[in-house]
Amino acid sequence: MAKIRLGMVGGGQGGFIGAVHRIAARLDDEFELVAGALSSDPIRALDSANSIGIVEARAYTSYQRMAETEAKRSDGIEAVAIVTPNDSHADIATIFLNHGIHVICDKPLAVSVEQARMLGAAAAKSGKILAVTYNYRGYPLIRQARAMCVSREIGKIRIVEVEYLQDWLAERIEIGGSKGAQWRTDPERTGGAGAIGDIGVHAFDLARYVTGLRLDALSAELTSFVPGRRVDDDARVLLRFEDGAKGLLWASQVAIGNENGLAIRVYGDRGGLEWHQSEPNELWYSQLGSPTQKLTRGGPGISVAAGQATRLPAGHPEGYLEAFAFIYKEVAAAIRASQNATDRNDESSFAMAIDGIAGLNFIQAALLSSAGGGVWQAVEKPS
Amino acid sequence: MAKIRLGMVGGGQGGFIGAVHRIAARLDDEFELVAGALSSDPIRALDSANSIGIVEARAYTSYQRMAETEAKRSDGIEAVAIVTPNDSHADIATIFLNHGIHVICDKPLAVSVEQARMLGAAAAKSGKILAVTYNYRGYPLIRQARAMCVSREIGKIRIVEVEYLQDWLAERIEIGGSKGAQWRTDPERTGGAGAIGDIGVHAFDLARYVTGLRLDALSAELTSFVPGRRVDDDARVLLRFEDGAKGLLWASQVAIGNENGLAIRVYGDRGGLEWHQSEPNELWYSQLGSPTQKLTRGGPGISVAAGQATRLPAGHPEGYLEAFAFIYKEVAAAIRASQNATDRNDESSFAMAIDGIAGLNFIQAALLSSAGGGVWQAVEKPS
Amino acid sequence: MAKIRLGMVGGGQGGFIGAVHRIAARLDDEFELVAGALSSDPIRALDSANSIGIVEARAYTSYQRMAETEAKRSDGIEAVAIVTPNDSHADIATIFLNHGIHVICDKPLAVSVEQARMLGAAAAKSGKILAVTYNYRGYPLIRQARAMCVSREIGKIRIVEVEYLQDWLAERIEIGGSKGAQWRTDPERTGGAGAIGDIGVHAFDLARYVTGLRLDALSAELTSFVPGRRVDDDARVLLRFEDGAKGLLWASQVAIGNENGLAIRVYGDRGGLEWHQSEPNELWYSQLGSPTQKLTRGGPGISVAAGQATRLPAGHPEGYLEAFAFIYKEVAAAIRASQNATDRNDESSFAMAIDGIAGLNFIQAALLSSAGGGVWQAVEKPS
Amino acid sequence: MAKIRLGMVGGGQGGFIGAVHRIAARLDDEFELVAGALSSDPIRALDSANSIGIVEARAYTSYQRMAETEAKRSDGIEAVAIVTPNDSHADIATIFLNHGIHVICDKPLAVSVEQARMLGAAAAKSGKILAVTYNYRGYPLIRQARAMCVSREIGKIRIVEVEYLQDWLAERIEIGGSKGAQWRTDPERTGGAGAIGDIGVHAFDLARYVTGLRLDALSAELTSFVPGRRVDDDARVLLRFEDGAKGLLWASQVAIGNENGLAIRVYGDRGGLEWHQSEPNELWYSQLGSPTQKLTRGGPGISVAAGQATRLPAGHPEGYLEAFAFIYKEVAAAIRASQNATDRNDESSFAMAIDGIAGLNFIQAALLSSAGGGVWQAVEKPS
């Protein structure tokens, strides 16, 4: 099956979310990144493109030009990933949609409701896909939680609590060199929202996705705790959903000790669910009057939906793949170094023949010791 | 930078570890899979190759032929990943090394010490890299633990405890249809080892890698608990390391309730360390007389080595990338479906314009409510 | 030191909190329970008194009479514990204070602010102690948390989150036979409050005690989720403290899967704290830019205040004492049975000579095996 | 019901385990401590007795004299608790048994198998109870685990793993002032055993009690890691039980970061169990092919045996009672201070009228705010 040709706007060297989008696009081998407007600075745009394998001819400095040019190519991009700051999402996305190119846009979609609506209309008119990367929907056990809410396995939902706690803005780092902190705390660039827009909206989408409920009304208390900060860095919000469910949303970027603590709890009239991103492979399920169960990714009692979102057997935590990939990454570095005698690296962390032999020595000694009734057996050491 | 051209032996449709190797090779964009001897069955070899984007001309049914042919091509593979059952590793690896091709071999390297040694010699002679995928070395916090052992941050090591517990062989499933269980419990194919070779050797390598210590002697108690089983399904081993450290290794495939429970604890004369694969982003560090600290991937107090093995900011658990990638996977499916009107799928889980608008409605209502002193604010629902 | 003579009002057979007060009074050997008005029913009052060692002459059916009579005795009670339903607290306490007797009253003090104030005035006038059993203040690590807030170890407090979640009222059990559910859901007996008064006030006191902050204002959303229930069974409250701190309080009795989940998190501008009653021996302490620390009861880094509230060395969880006491309880039963040949119980769970011998056999075999280099050593079995 | 009259040998001021025995004896109100030979030093014996309410006439300096004298009194002790160092247990217990007094002896029963056997014989001859305080049998969920093993709810037992890890002997503190460390590391006083006898025997008894299995043979590796130490401070032992079960026991007093880490895991052919003393209210139960369940003390699915060992409702952790008792302890201190004007203490931690009023102010404000649709409501502060 041919890969889908993908372009990217934003995501030049040094950014975090651009790299995440590229890995995500690559992981299941469905996309091929062939074009990019990674920076408006010509040098940086070219360098960035080069470092990720985009050819010079398709390394643009203007997204408008990129949209036009790619739309005309017979091998032009079919989809574009937009990973720029929030205030530019709507413009960029609209242009690509208008050129008949599918759009994958980082969240939030825009900085105002009006922008978002116009963009929605543009998507509808284009007949193209406009996806927003509310990425937390992708966890297998979030799929499981949703399936259990929608099927009413926990009964009619009464209470939804969702929280997203960080601490990286506990001090006024926006006046230092952090670019990420700068635009996130600049009301002109965020539409006035701070934590509520940066992470609160993730929490909101998670509650919405998991429960399938729509929000009726809210009462919010947004606070700027850090002196001098121009947007909220803490948001506590009471929620009223349709059908009588109530809720609580707490997003904070000053909760010291929380790196990226996203969690959701849902209580229905027959059961309860609890999930924490810090342990993404576990979903706690309680039925009234029964012991709480730990549902695991790929483990017993898991729905079809969650099963489909699983690449690994149970017990192999998400993260297993990343660790495995580091081995490959280091082997690649070693292979490249081996082609260049001056660049030899003897500090490899991956296992080599000597380690493989050590393993066999171990197995052999264990077999011998056990066969001998547990006698102590010397273990040979590979030299 | 050009990608390294990679081939694969084994890993046809339905296998687990072949897919893991391919994702791992792809994640950091260092390799390009261009050839494969995925199966000895011609139909299956071709189908498998096709499904993962290997062209027909380079879909081999014999690894010997693959080695010969690829070695002659100017664009032939530079490295090969071997993911076949253990008893074939040595032969296959030797052939590729002899043809000047780097080898990435699944563990264990071989089924006997002799085989492993001969293979080591072949690698040395070839000047090529022979890597064994003891993949647990790739976790960032395992790197951190190693750094703290090697630098003697926990002092001189006294005790090492490592355990690897599973339960998938708690019943005699090898007489059912599980191919994975069949060869893993067939002493002819494993060199006589059961759990000790399948997972015990992972635990052994982890202890070896983290502590940097070499094993002097062991006393083992291997047991086949499941009636009729021909190899051990539980191994408890006392360890004596060089320099006086002692240890304990426990590998079991009948420990019901453990999906894939790999864990290590190391105690020195000044401190202790504890890590569990089920929570791979946390390393517990205790100094004598101080409160225990939770070190996190990317968090404060982390070594250079562990930092290099990190792709994401602290608090984004390993697994974040996989979840993110599901969004991309589903967008790809939707894009493909959109190109084929008869295959439309309206059940997408990824967020679309309507969800993006919902998020903006939420943010706007929160800003208004808070500005109004916390008045309840109706939230518009996108239609 | 002579024990303090204690009386009790309420707490007849079958009640929970009366027994808790009695154990609490006994644990540190400071009180001696000598009188009681345990029930208004004469038979039940006498039976209850008898079963807990109160002599007939001091088993009252009226608390008024008890107050009068005991006040006149030269060996009369010095203090009284009040464990009746909430609506009677104020009357009873006032009478005892007026008779010069110290009062230990279960929470909440009363069912209205006016009652509570009058009672406070009565206490002030009497010069006697009026204690309210906000018992969660008694945890050693709550003392520690308070010390760290008051000393500003976490800096100026910004956010306080406290939650108290239960699920025992997830169904309308007040229409069944549960007496505890009946009065707790009867607005006439609770002053109109449900969960907010029963457990919310515990959460409030915990926040107040730990932080030392006083509450300025609140915005509350109280809900009766269970159809037909006459008081709130869920309360979510936004808090504004003096000095600019903000907070969140959530009390629920319908959160399925939570037995008695009391927890508090406090974030200041230099650090954060987190404590869960389910693991009362651990307090999580984060300083900005340092790894999170696990402070333990009796462990390193603990304040004087918390140290004073500790009876056991570190690592002996609260609960160790209760388990130890079961051994004594069963020995007592065995001693009583041994005095009555027809009541012999051979099913003792406590260890006896045979178990003690087994232990010595084990130690001896271990010493011999180890001395012999780890040879397998048969273990004698006591007969 | 009259309390059982109890005496104590050992347990003078400053000791830990004597105080634990006294609290345990008091908790359920079954015993009354009336006599003691708390120290062989006359002054210390008398002071210690005085401080715990034993009258001077029954404060002995010799346990022989105590046994003789008490046996003759009509109100003499019926049982004695022995909390002296291990080497004296057998002598003391024998004398009391010979005088017809029940014995509750701290573990281990003796320092040699021969001693233990002779003591067992003395107990049998006396017809009196000889209890050994393997106190970990007293945890409700240990009862539950035992019930599930004995009833074969987890099937035929295959593997038992038990560990007891501490770190207080990680340095050679026996050459400092620690009396507890001195006798525990003196082979003359312990019969040659170190960690294996001090805590290993607890772990052994726990395995024995929970599983009901008897040990056939063992292979032990005892080590003295701390230079100069005369007994083992780490013991790793392979176990073979009757009926084919195998096991692992690890006791260490140098495992830095472990305060008192007792834990047991049992795997049968149908299920598995896991329990940690650090979270004594949770027992993890896995059936093959089902999600793991968290059984809680007093929660759903608990056996009769475990239910009987429970004093509190589910979710009130063991420790709740201790915390509650601190409130009483501080009230007692305040009462005593109030009787002595010069000793006034205004730093009480327990709640008083002002706190009770604060609670009512909170409840009232919450009711008003909620009734007003969530308006912000000022909260009165008690003065």
Image (cartoon, coloured by chain):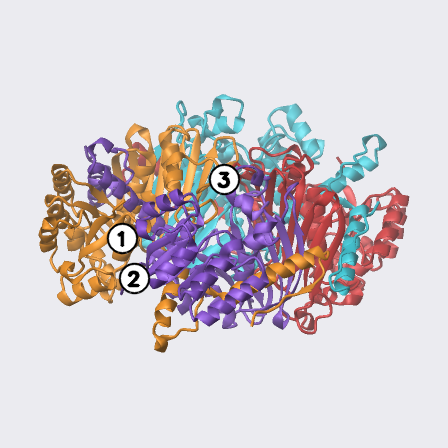
Chain colours: A red, B cyan, C purple, D orange
- What residue does disc 2 label? C75
Q: Which three-letter amino acid code belongs to the residue tagged 1?
A: His
Amino acid tagged 3: Asn
In the rendered view, tell whether residue D267 sits above or below residue B283. Answer: above
Give the chain of mark 1: D
Q: Nearer the viewer, residue C336 or B233?
A: C336
Label 3 to label 1: alpha-carbon separation: 42 Å
Place of residue C30 in the rendered image (x, y in percent of width and height, measured from the top left): 32, 61
Q: Indicate which label's residue lies in the foreground, 2 or 3.
A: 2
Secondary structure beneath disc 2?
loop
Query: Looking at the image, which residue is at 73% across and 41% down?
Result: B349
Label 3 is found on which chain of the structure? B
The chain letter for the residue carrying disc 2 is C
Q: Residues within 10 Å of mark 1 (few under 14, many from 20)?
A: many
Task: Answer above or below: position of B162 versus B291.
Answer: above
Task: In this rendered view, identify the residue nearer to me: D312 or D186.
Answer: D312
From the image, tell me which residue sits under label 3.
B260
